[in-house]
Amino acid sequence: MQVNEAILKRRSVRAYKPEPVKPELLQQIFNEAQQSPSNCNTQPWHVVVVSGESRDAIEKAMIADIMAGKPPTPHFTPGDHQLKDQYRKRQIACAIALYDAMDIAYEEKQKRQELMVKNWQFFGAPHAAFFSMPKSMSEINAVDMGIYLQTLMLLMTEHGLASCPQGALAMYTDKVHEMANIPEDHAIMFGLSFGYEDTDHQINQFDVGRADLNDSVEFLT
């Protein structure tokens, strides 16, 4: 698969087959992702992949906190609460497309909340990864984290795997830090659910598209 093919094929998948990925393939993909570039080669990422019993225990712990009404405890302030203009419009359009795919009307608040909770159930994926970096690091290192994540997702696409990057997995982290063996001085930035796509599930049947090139890029001569 060419790089451009992987870029065009990759998308956020929200329903998975229960079949786990073979350990040797996971090792290969994450080993290849180590070649991701970073500022001064600092490689700030720390990744914990959870599968099987550890994955199920973490899901149970996060859902228990949510059901108990505990407030989110992200280390970094989520930026999506301050979106406006075209960025807010794109966010809303994405949500509407998702609801439409699931035949959920906007006024059906309970169904929307039930759909949201699937984030912390890893959308049924057999594997998930938690990405953290030292709390002492800054925005430039966060850029490196994003580059690493993209590298990893494209490699997964090349190897026939689907994935979904999730800021939601950095929201309820009190128990996750201990259960996933996250270093004490690290902050979880985001998570990634992954596995083999359930291509028949209706939630995977929508496409949000992208903005026109002229809306994002300028060429000066």
Image: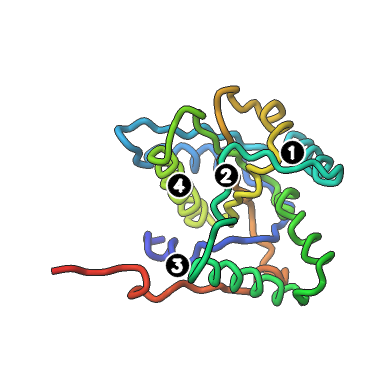
Q: What residue sits right under mark 3 in the picture?
A: 8
Kindly check if marks 1 and 3 are in contact, taking CB atoms under 8 A apart as contact.
no
Rounded to the nearest angstrom, the CA distance separating label 1 from label 3 is: 30 Å
Residue 144, placed above or below residue 184: below
Tell which circle, 4 or 2, labels the residue nearer the N-terminal end.
2
Which label is found at residue 52? 1
Foreground: disc 1 or disc 3: 3
How many other residues sit within 10 Å of disc 1, few (<14), some (14-19) or many (≥20)? few
Residue under the image location 77 percent in, 65 percent down = 112
Give the percent coordinates (x, y) of residue 57. Answer: 79, 36
Amino acid on which the number 4 mark rests in the picture? Gly
Given this view, does label 4 or label 1 mark the residue nearer the observer?
Answer: 4
Q: Look at 37% across and 73% down and name the residue there.
A: 215
**Mark 2 crowdedness (10 Å alpha carbons): few <14, some 14-19, many ≥20:** few
Decide which of tag 1 and tag 3 comes sooner along the chain.
3
Name the amino acid, label 1. Gly
For residue 173, the mark is none
80 w.r.t. 202: above or below: above
User: Circle 2 sits on which residue?
Assistant: 77
**N-terminal of the two: label 1 or label 2?**
1
The residue at which mark 4 appears reads as 146
Amino acid at pointer 2: Thr
Residue 13, relative to residue 27: is it above or below? below
In terms of secondary structure, where does tag 3 sit? helix
- Residue most extreme to the right: 68
* Mark 2 secondary-structure assignment: loop
